[in-house]
Amino acid sequence: MKIYDPDIRELLLKKFLKTKAFISDPTTKLIHEMDVCFGTSRIDIAVINGKIHGYEIKSEQDTLDRLPAQIESYNKIFDTMTIVTGENHISKVIEIVPDWWGIYYVVKKSNQPILKRKRQFKINKKVDTFYLAQLLWKNELLELLRLNGINKGVKSKTRFALCEIVNENIEKQKIKDFVRKKLKSRESWRAVQLQQLCDDLPQ
């Protein structure tokens, strides 16, 4: 039995629905395939509640060729990171990923995939708020600036320039709080509430 990306996603969703920190917050949102760092990388799953959690999947069929570049991007954005991999990649993954990343791997038991934890994640203390701000849409960046008394000459700026202004002029925690709030409150977006996924999973 081969284990593919969709199999791992299903295992992760079941795990999320048993994670107290996720299910105790009814505003927890889950996003598949979220672009980060101006589209240079795309995280497989992001979970947003009081923190922004990233989950990168490397199934047995995947290679690890892109992982070093992905690590560089994800380290700038996520409060926590977890990689979930096929058993064939586990030794190499341990060598490559930072010490603060969590590591899970998938094994087969009675011909069924089972998720095993190799290492629990730690908190990332080096989030880069310039890259975090790029998760915001332009109107959201302008709102953040306005709320912090920065209005003059900003409407004509590019998103890149607005991210620079935000990063240089607003406290890190304010940026982090605003980004989480906006990502969770967007209505016309592909994010879904975690609890809405319960009925979609096979029992």
Image: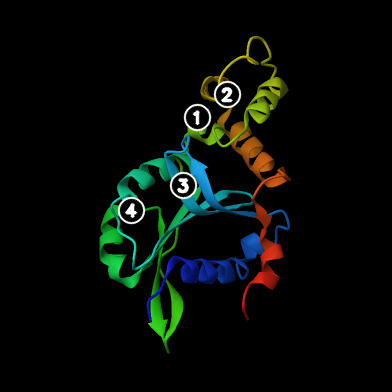
Whether pointer 4 and pointer 3 mark residues with C-beta atoms closer than 8 Å, the reply is: no
Q: Residue furthest top?
A: 153
Counting the numbered discs, the total is 4
On residue 57, the disc is none
Secondary structure of the residue carrying tag 1 is: helix
Q: Is residue 122 visible?
A: no
Disc 2 + disc 1, Cβ < 8 Å: yes
Q: Residues within 10 Å of mark 3 (few under 14, many from 20)?
A: some
Tell which circle, 4 or 3, labels the residue nearer the N-terminal end: 3
- In the rendered image, residue 64, in percent from the top left (x then y), is placed at 30, 56
- Circle on res. 166: 2
Position of the C terminus, as image quadrant, is: bottom right
Q: Is residue 176 above or below residue 142?
A: below
Residue 131, percent from left and from top: 49, 33
Which residue is under mark 3? 42
Q: Earlier in the sequence, mark 3 or mark 2?
A: 3
Q: Secondary structure at mark 4?
A: loop
Q: Earlier in the sequence, mark 2 or mark 1?
A: 1
Q: Earlier in the sequence, mark 4 or mark 1?
A: 4
Residue bearing mark 1: 130
Q: Is residue 156 above or below residue 5?
A: above
Residue identifier under label 4: 97
Q: CA distance from mark 3 to mark 2?
A: 23 Å
Cα distance in 3D space between marks 2 and 1: 7 Å
- Mark earlier in primary sequence (3, 1): 3
How many neighbours does mark 2 have within 10 angstroms: few (below 14), some (14-19), or many (20 or more)?
A: many
**How far across and down, in percent of the image, does residue 5 sit?**
44, 66
Left or right of 103? Residue 156 is right
